[in-house]
Image (cartoon, helix red, strand yellow):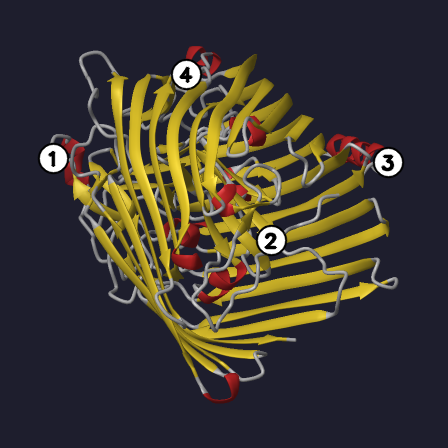
């Protein structure tokens, strides 16, 4: 880690000769009319109107993030068709976009859909920890983004854009919340310019707690609680007209109990089904202990920008650190209910840093282009622990993993006009990943998933060329039609819980996805309606699929091919002053063309797991004008998902029934516009669904979603 810090600091010192990129904001809403605001995004690594970008993007602005209580990735997924989120557990989420995701959390594994924090790649699932207070917007980019965003964005990317310091004026804000389950939250922000408006600092922080949603009837504890603290300090300066600097330090600390596990179903074909007692009560669990999910993560980011006569030179550097530990009862039972006790968890320490240097065309140039080079390095030490107690005979198996990654890339992308209305888009990226991996199972007292003791060191390198090409046509300022072909890849890797030395040395190759997409984006009726539509087909090759064997070992293979076909639509309509309707829908037909997980088993034609065919989000709202400029807003979010298979076999019991979730809020804003009071509720119908599940040892184990929550929030803005 010391070497990481030294190398990172050296890169920053060299880059200090260069320059940082200004953030972009959303245009102010016109509360008195029926014209919708323009949304600015950076999906192509430059500021553009959402309606001008030939990419399917779902964007949440600062106001929506605040009022809809979008606090973490799970909240984004609820309101985004085409995006799935599994709390498996909540501190190590599984994210999938357009049917492409990954369950591989091993030290030598990678996600298939990536999260970026201010353009910085968050390389480990447990490091996806941020509080959405004081963010500018959240962008969900769908489909392969390998040209501009790089490795492991086969399905797409989530980019969280925080607010940068304002050099223009002093600003401050505060938020306080109380709610059921003893919810207590507080957040605050302070922005202070100095040096005659040439520099500014911005400090923000949040504290969020609530009691556990579930009572453990065996220990008397409550589980599935929250206790998190996060903070961010940013410094921005413009020491010269052509030089801009931005530096940010952020951190998150969370201390939570484990998830409430349950025996959901019995596998009657397995004689070990007799060992288990079904427990489907979401409000209670009976695990042998409460468990814990502890996470400390922090990072520093530096962005420097210098304007040149012909382009802008940009340096972007980061360092991030993760210390994570979790342990909990897997079966949700105890010796009085289950004859086998399954528990365990993970311990991980990761450090990763990146440097990116790029040249970009000046704003307003007829030809928009970007070219650059990228370096990412990481070190991960991880322990995977499994404890089994069978009729009083207990043992522990430990896999100790250590991985080092060096990733190098060069890229270029250009958008050039062909005529006044027609433009061509082309981009290419070359990436080389080098992985060194060591794994052993020497420290545990027993072997459950492995057949032998081993200590194996392996290494491999993976190369890929990803690209995109297409045409955009703007028949008028209010309409965009485009056709794009894009290719992305996810790096290869090694097994995290192999059964033998031979399996440990046998890695898996990269996976690739090529997407063919046509889209239309339109602003209609004088700006009162925005309507966007997308059709796509994605060819998904060399899938990295994971399967759990009867002995609980997990194997990752390049097992097949799939075709994903879909349609997405987004409609935003302001019929009259104060009223708004936002509707989005995704149809996703994600099926295997070839997939044989073992001899004699054929999953061709099956749907890819954790991918609903239909997802619909409807969000109506109305703001009533009150005396002296005050306002009262009524808003509702309805989200529907069709049936989900949690296993690629598409067989029961690993299935989730369709769900209907309803959130709502009533927000009063005073005449000064400084104060708002929000009465809010989430999952108001108390819908029950399984957030993840898996069959092994004769039963189907899993957990449920949070119950109905509600509260009162008070916000103040300077």
| Mark 2 in CB contact with mark 4 (< 8 angstroms) | no
Q: Is residue 494 above or below residue 630?
A: above
Which dot marks residue 17? Answer: 3
Task: Identify the mark nearer the N-term, 3 or 1.
Answer: 3
The residue tagged 4 is: 452
Q: Nearer the viewer, residue 206 or 393?
A: 206
**Front residue of 267 and 416:** 416
Foreground tag (4 vs 1): 1
Q: CA distance from mark 2 to mark 4?
A: 39 Å
254 over 472 or under it: above or below? below
Specify the quadrant that holds the C terminus. Answer: bottom right
Position in image of residue 342 (x %, y %):
33, 40
Side of 376 relative to 160 (left or right): right
**Picture residue at 40% right of the left edge, 35% below the top:** 386
Q: How would you rate the neighbour count of disc 1 (Cα within 10 Å): few for under 14, some for 14-19, many for 20 or more? A: few
Q: CA distance from mark 3 to mark 1?
A: 67 Å
Residue at 16% in and 32% down:
651
Q: Which residue is denoted by mark 1 in the rendering? A: 268
Mark nearer the N terminus (3 vs 4): 3
Of residues 348 and 176, the one drawn nearer to the viewer in this rendering: 176
Precedes in sequence: disc 1 or disc 2: 2
Q: Position of residue 182 (x, y in %)?
A: 43, 73
The picture places residue 355, in percent across and down from the top left corner, at 71, 32
- SS label for mark 4: loop
Residue lying furthest left: 268
Q: Where is residue 477? Give x, y as percent.
A: 49, 46
Which quarter of the rendered picture does the N terminus lie within? top right
Residue bearing mark 2 = 252
**Mark nearer the N terminus (2 vs 4):** 2
Separation (CA) of disc 2 from disc 3 = 31 Å
Residue shown at 61% from the left, 42% from the top:
322
């Amino acid at each position: 880690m010391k070497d990481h810090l030294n190398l990172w600091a050296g890169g920053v010192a060299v880059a200090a000769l260069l320059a940082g990129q200004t953030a972009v904001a959303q245009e102010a809403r016109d509360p008195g009319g029926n014209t919708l605001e323009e949304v600015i995004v950076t999906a192509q690594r430059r500021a553009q109107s959402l309606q001008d970008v030939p990419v399917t993007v779902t964007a949440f602005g600062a106001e929506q993030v605040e009022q809809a209580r979008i606090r973490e990735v799970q909240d984004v997924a609820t309101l985004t068709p085409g995006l799935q989120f599994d709390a498996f557990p909540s501190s190590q989420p599984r994210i999938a976009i357009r049917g492409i995701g990954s369950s591989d959390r091993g030290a030598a594994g990678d996600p298939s859909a990536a999260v970026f924090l201010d353009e910085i790649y968050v390389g480990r699932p447990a490091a996806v920890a941020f509080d959405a207070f004081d963010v500018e917007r959240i962008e969900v980019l769908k489909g392969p983004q390998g040209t501009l965003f790089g490795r492991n964005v086969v399905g797409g990317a989530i980019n969280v854009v925080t607010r940068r310091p304002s050099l223009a004026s002093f600003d401050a804000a505060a938020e306080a919340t109380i709610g059921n389950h003893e919810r207590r939250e507080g957040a605050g922000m302070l922005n202070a310019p100095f040096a005659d408006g040439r520099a500014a600092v911005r400090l923000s922080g949040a504290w969020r707690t609530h009691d556990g949603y579930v009572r453990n009837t065996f220990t008397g504890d409550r589980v599935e609680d929250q206790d998190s603290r996060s903070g961010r300090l940013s410094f921005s300066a413009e020491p010269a007209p052509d030089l801009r600097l931005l530096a940010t330090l952020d951190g998150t600390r969370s201390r939570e109990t484990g998830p409430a596990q349950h025996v959901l179903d019995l596998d009657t074909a397995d004689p070990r089904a007799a060992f288990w007692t079904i427990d489907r009560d979401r409000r209670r669990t009976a695990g042998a202990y409460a468990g814990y999910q502890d996470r400390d993560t922090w990072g520093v980011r530096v962005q420097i920008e210098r304007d040149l006569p012909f382009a802008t030179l940009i340096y972007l550097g980061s360092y991030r650190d993760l210390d994570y530990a979790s342990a909990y009862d897997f079966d949700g039972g105890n010796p009085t209910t289950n004859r086998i006790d399954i528990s365990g968890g993970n311990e991980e320490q990761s450090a990763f840093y990146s440097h990116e240097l790029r040249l970009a065309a000046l704003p307003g140039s007829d030809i928009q282009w970007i070219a650059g080079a990228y370096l990412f390095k990481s070190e991960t030490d991880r322990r995977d622990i499994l404890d089994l107690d069978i009729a009083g005979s207990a043992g522990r198996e430990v896999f100790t993993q250590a991985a080092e990654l060096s990733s190098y890339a060069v890229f270029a992308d250009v958008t050039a006009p062909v005529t006044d209305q027609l433009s061509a888009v082309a981009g290419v990226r070359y990436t080389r990943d080098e992985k060194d991996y060591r794994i052993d199972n020497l420290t545990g007292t027993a072997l459950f998933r492995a057949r032998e003791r081993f200590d194996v060191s392996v290494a491999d390198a993976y190369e890929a060329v990803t690209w995109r090409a297409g045409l955009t046509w703007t028949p008028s300022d209010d309409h965009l039609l485009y056709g794009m072909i894009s290719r992305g890849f996810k790096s290869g890797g090694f097994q995290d819980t192999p059964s033998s030395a031979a399996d440990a040395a046998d890695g898996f190759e990269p996976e690739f996805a090529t997407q063919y997409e046509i889209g239309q984006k339109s602003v209609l009726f004088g700006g009162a309606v925005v309507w966007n539509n997308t059709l796509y087909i994605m060819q998904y090759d060399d899938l990295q699929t994971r399967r759990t064997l009867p002995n609980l070992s997990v194997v990752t293979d390049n097992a097949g091919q799939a075709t994903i076909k879909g349609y997405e639509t987004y409609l935003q309509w302001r019929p009259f002053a104060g009223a708004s309707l936002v509707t989005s829908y995704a149809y996703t037909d994600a099926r295997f063309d070839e997939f044989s997980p073992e001899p004699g088993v054929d999953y061709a034609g099956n749907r890819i797991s954790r991918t609903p065919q239909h997802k619909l989000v409807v969000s109506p709202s109305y703001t009533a004008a009150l005396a002296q400029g005050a306002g009262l807003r009524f808003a509702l979010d309805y989200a529907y998902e069709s049936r989900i298979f949690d296993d690629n076999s598409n067989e029961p019991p690993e299935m989730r029934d369709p769900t209907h979730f309803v959130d709502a809020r009533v927000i009063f804003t005073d005449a000064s516009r400084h104060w708002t009071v929000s009465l809010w509720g989430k999952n108001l119908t108390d819908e029950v669904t399984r957030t993840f599940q898996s069959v092994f040892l004769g039963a189907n184990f899993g957990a449920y979603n949070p119950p109905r929550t509600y509260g009162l929030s008070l916000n103040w803005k300077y």
